[in-house]
Amino acid sequence: MSESSEQWTEGVHHVGLTVPDLEAALRFFTEGLGMKQVGEVLSYPAAFVSDGHVMVTLWRAKDPENATPFDRQQGIGLHHLSLQVAEATRLDALHERLAAWEDVEIEFAPEPLGGGPTRHMMCAIPGGIRVEFIAPASS
C-alpha cells in the first residue's frame, strides 16, 4: 500500500454500541447526559441519540441474557467511548450526577489526564460499557 498525504475522513459520524437493556441505555444518554433522541428502529430494535456533535447508535443485543459481557482487556473492538465536556466545572457536576445514577459504576472521579491540565473521568454505563468524559484545558 502506498503512502498518501491526502486526508480521507472528516471526524466521527457515529458510534454504535450493543447494549443488553435498550431502555436503560437510552435513559442514560437522554436523561443522564441530556442528549436528544434523533431516531429509532423498533424492529431492530435500536435508538439513535445525539449531542449535536456526535451520534450514538444503541442496539439491543439479540439475546441479552446470554450475551458476552464487555471485557476491555480481553475483547477485540471498543475499549471505551470518550465524550468531551465543555469545562472542568461541568465535569465535576457530571461526576456528581452520574455517581448517583442507578446502574452507573464510577471507575475513577475527575482527575488530571497524564499529569496535565486536561481532566477526565471514567465510568461504566448501564450494560457495562466504559465511557470516559474529558474536559480539555481552557485555552
Image: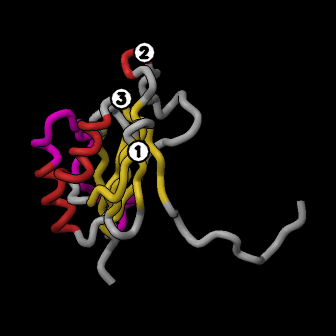
Element carrying mark 2: helix
Q: Are marks 2 and 1 in contact (CB under 8 Å)?
A: no
Whether 10 is drawn above or below 106: the answer is: below
Q: Position of residue 13 (x, y in %)?
A: 51, 63
User: Which residue is label 1 attached to?
Assistant: 41
Magenta range: 98-116
Q: In this image, 1 relative to 13: left or right?
A: right
Residue at image location 58% in from the left, 34% down from the top: 76
Mark 3 residue type: Pro
Q: Is residue 101 above or below residue 74?
A: below
Residue 91 spot, x, y in % from top left: 21, 61
x, y percentage for residue 106?
A: 23, 40
Q: CA distance from mark 1 to mark 3?
A: 16 Å
Which residue was labeled with disc 3?
A: 20
- Residue that numbered label 2 is attached to: 66
Kindly give the residue lying farthest to the top in the view shown: 66
Name the residue at 29% across, 40% down: 25
Quadrant where the N terminus is found in the figure? bottom right
Given the image, on which type of amino acid does mark 2 rest?
Asn
Q: Nearer the viewer, residue 81 or 139?
A: 81
Helix, strand or loop at disc 1?
Answer: strand
N-terminal-most mark, 2 or 1: 1
Tell which residue pokes out farthest to the front in this image: 43
- Badge 2 crowding class, 10 Å Cα cut-off, few under 14, some 14 to 19, many 20 or more, is few
Of circles 2 and 1, the one toward us is 1
Identify the element where label 3 is drawn: loop
Tell which circle, 3 or 2, labels the residue nearer the N-terminal end.
Answer: 3
Give me the residue at 14% from left, 43% from top: 99
Residue 39 image point, x, y percent: 36, 54
